[in-house]
Amino acid sequence: MRLVGALVGQFRRKAHMTQRALSEHLPIDEETVASIEQGRRNLQPDVAEIMDQVLGTKGALAVAVENLPEVDKYPLYAEEFMRYEREALSRSAFDAVAVPGLLQTERYARAAFASAVPPFDDEEYEAAVTARLERQAVLHRKPPLVASFVIAQGVLMQQLGGAAVLKEQLRHLRACADLPGVSVQIMPFERPLHAGLSGPFVLVETADHQQYAYVEHQRGSQLTDDPATVTALNQRYGMLRTQALNTEETKGLLERMAGEL
């Protein structure tokens, strides 16, 4: 991704164009051109083709985008998303696979990373655990992050790491539910409708009131500020909150589940 961005910048300068001048020929604005050149955003194939025409680069950018390796398409550990997360005004997340990383205990996080296939080596494993725990500082900052979590009930029945680890995790979730600005809701089994069947996602609003959606999948992750996508996921999250147990019902269920282990 950074290599493609560097090529865009080099070709633009050789064409004696500013970022603003280039953006006037494209379906993106000057700020997005700058983000692409800095390697912070992907250059989309359709935009690459237009750039090649404007800059006279004979298809070089389109070929570069088409042949990007997967590791460049999706930055390791979604660094851009985590930067937005640290500075966010609000964060909303639906999880149906594991307890959200911001709410994990150390032992649960270790069990989660130990489950990775192919496995991490020792150094990668410790670095991943440390990074996950350090991210949780965002829940304790001043002013507090407004954070909402909807978690599928099945996640809280999977004994990742064993019964003792799950019991500790349930108690930790209950304590997190009382943090300033934090709300935790469980999506129970008994609902006839479920707005989250398409899978987990995260929504963040930054300090300059920009909204982003973040989705992880088997081969990496995607971060987008596309208005149609962000709007659809906001609508989906709103529906999930109405379908889930309310915060007080969730606290009671967490206490009962922990007591049964």
Image (spheres, grey):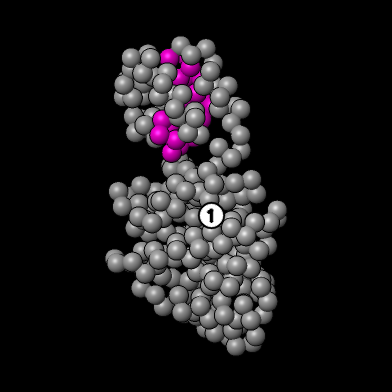
- What residue is drawn where x is 45% and y is 61%? 135
Q: Position of residue 57 (x, y in %)?
A: 48, 14
In this rendering, the answer to whether 195 lies above or below 39 is below
Above/below status of 72 relative to 239? above
Quadrant in the picture for residue 115:
bottom right
Q: Spot the residue most to the front.
A: 123
Residue 241 appears in view: no
39 is within the stretch colored magenta: yes
Q: Secondary structure at mark 1?
A: strand
- Residue named by callout 1: 201
The foreground one among 8 and 210 is 8
- The quarter of the picture where residue 137 lies is bottom left
Q: Main secondary structure of the magenta part?
A: helix
Where, quadrant-wise, is the C terminus in this rendering?
A: bottom right
Q: Residue at x 53, y 81 (%)?
A: 171
At label 1, the amino acid type is Phe
Residue placed most toward the observer, 82 or 184: 82
Which quadrant holds residue 109? bottom right
Q: Position of residue 181 (x, y in %)?
A: 36, 69
Reply above or below: 53 against 111: above
Above or below, comparing residue 219 to residue 148 in the picture: above
- Residue 95: horizontal and vertical position, in percent? 56, 62
Q: Nearer the viewer, residue 148 or 18?
A: 18
Magenta region, residue range: 36-55
Q: What residue is shown at x 61% (from left), y 27% (from top)?
A: 67
Horizontal relation, residue 162 to residue 231: left or right: right
The crowd level at tag 1 (other Cα within 10 Å; few <14, some 14-19, many 20+) is some
Left or right: 192 as drawn, with respect to 145 = right
Residue 30, x across and y down, in percent: 34, 29
